[in-house]
Image (cartoon, rainbow, N blue to C red):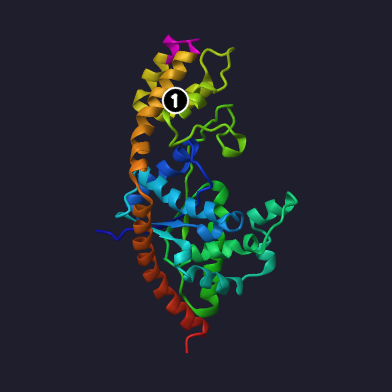
């Protein structure tokens, strides 16, 4: 039996998740992670580039693990670990910082975007591509799932690997991106892409009352034959084989927007209620145990890799 390839992805929680996050990130991961030796890193040090609220960061660390476990990720089938518990990440990032140039880092999308908007770009944001490279390369990662707009992150990791390998000998595997081309673009309640920044979301783990309120606020186009925003969300909650049946319901109830929204609420609740119940059953202590066990596994791998790196750069005497 062929050995599984290793996959790594970083998780950041910026508050309450919505159904756009579920279909865009959580569900695609859920359907593929068992095909790989999967590592899920809670990117708490990356969060420090923008989040300066200790209480919020602590809660986010707990919440992001609960979210993934609630949708069905089995912590016995993936290594779930906390970045800050594995100090080798920041140590290796410093070594990479010493290999790349300032002009190279100035090409980073996140840094350029901040500067273009006139916002303060702290040094952590400037050098974070090398911390991300360390995250990936420490584990001899084969594939990293990213959206098309994040391809540069993997290019940076390959460049860091190549520079180290050229300077000190073959050490790091150059990872490949796994572009998630079929990620669903989920419309929000106003028809734009669902986003917390637009205030147009349907909460993933919200109560039935919260979901009802959000769905009933979906903007409908009374000039069309069916409410397209409602339908676009609705078909995400039905298997492909049921889309014809859904079309028939929308044709039969043409113009009955309230009834169609009530059908959508029922289908959303059928999917979300079991996940919400499972999430509510996961305690903070459960999460801490998962993080401790996963971080110990990650630490063992990272420590072995860094022992080799320290020897090659000449700091081990």
Q: Is residue 217 left or right of residue 270?
A: right
Label 1 neighbour load within 10 Å: few <14, some 14-19, many 20+: some
Q: Name the residue under label 1.
A: 234
Of 215 and 166, nearer the camera is 215
Is 106 inside the magenta-drawn segment?
no
Residue depicted at x 53% and y 64%: 133
Is 254 inside the magenta-drawn segment?
yes
In the image, residue 189 above or below residue 94: above
Of 313 and 53, nearer the camera is 53
Label 1: element kind: helix
Classify the position of the N terminus by image quarter.
bottom left
Please identify the residue farthest to the bottom as the structure is shown.
317
| Percent x, y of residue 89 | 49, 68
The answer to whether residue 79 is visible is no
Provide the residue span drawn in magenta. Answer: 250-257
Q: Is residue 303 left or right of residue 226?
A: left
Of 168 and 298, nearer the camera is 298
Please identify the residue farthest to the right as the structure is shown.
118
| Percent x, y of residue 247 | 42, 17
The answer to whether residue 50 is visible is yes
Q: Is residue 74 left or right of residue 81?
A: left
């Amino acid at each position: 039996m062929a050995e599984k390839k290793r996959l790594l992805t970083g998780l950041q929680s910026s508050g309450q998740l919505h159904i756009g996050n579920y279909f865009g990130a959580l569900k695609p991961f859920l359907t593929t992670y068992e095909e790989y030796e999967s590592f899920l890193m809670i990117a708490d040090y990356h969060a420090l580039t923008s989040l300066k609220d200790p209480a919020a960061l602590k809660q986010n660390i707990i919440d992001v693990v609960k979210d993934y476990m609630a949708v069905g990720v089995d912590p016995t089938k993936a290594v779930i670990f906390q970045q800050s518990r594995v100090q080798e990440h920041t140590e290796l990032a410093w070594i990479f910082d010493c290999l790349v140039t300032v002009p190279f880092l100035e090409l980073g999308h996140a840094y350029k975007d901040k500067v273009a908007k006139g916002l303060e770009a702290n040094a952590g944001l400037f050098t974070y591509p090398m911390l991300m490279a360390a995250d990936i390369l420490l584990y001899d990662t084969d594939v990293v799932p990213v959206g098309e707009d994040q391809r540069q992150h993997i290019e940076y990791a390959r460049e860091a690997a190549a520079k180290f390998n050229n300077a000190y000998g073959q050490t790091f595997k150059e990872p490949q991106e796994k572009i998630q081309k079929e990620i669903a673009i989920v419309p929000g309640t106003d028809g734009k892409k669902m986003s917390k920044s637009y205030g147009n979301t349907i909460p993933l783990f919200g109560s039935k009352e919260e979901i009802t309120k959000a769905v009933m606020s979906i903007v409908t186009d009374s000039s069309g034959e069916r409410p397209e925003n409602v339908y676009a969300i609705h078909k995400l909650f039905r298997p492909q084989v049921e889309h014809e049946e859904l079309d028939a319901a929308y044709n039969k109830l043409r113009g009955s927007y309230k009834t169609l929204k009530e059908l959508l609420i029922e289908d959303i609740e059928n999917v979300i209620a079991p996940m919400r119940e499972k999430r509510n059953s996961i305690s903070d202590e459960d999460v801490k145990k998962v993080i401790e066990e996963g971080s110990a596994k990650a630490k063992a791998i990272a420590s072995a890799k860094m022992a080799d790196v320290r020897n090659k750069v000449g700091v081990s005497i």
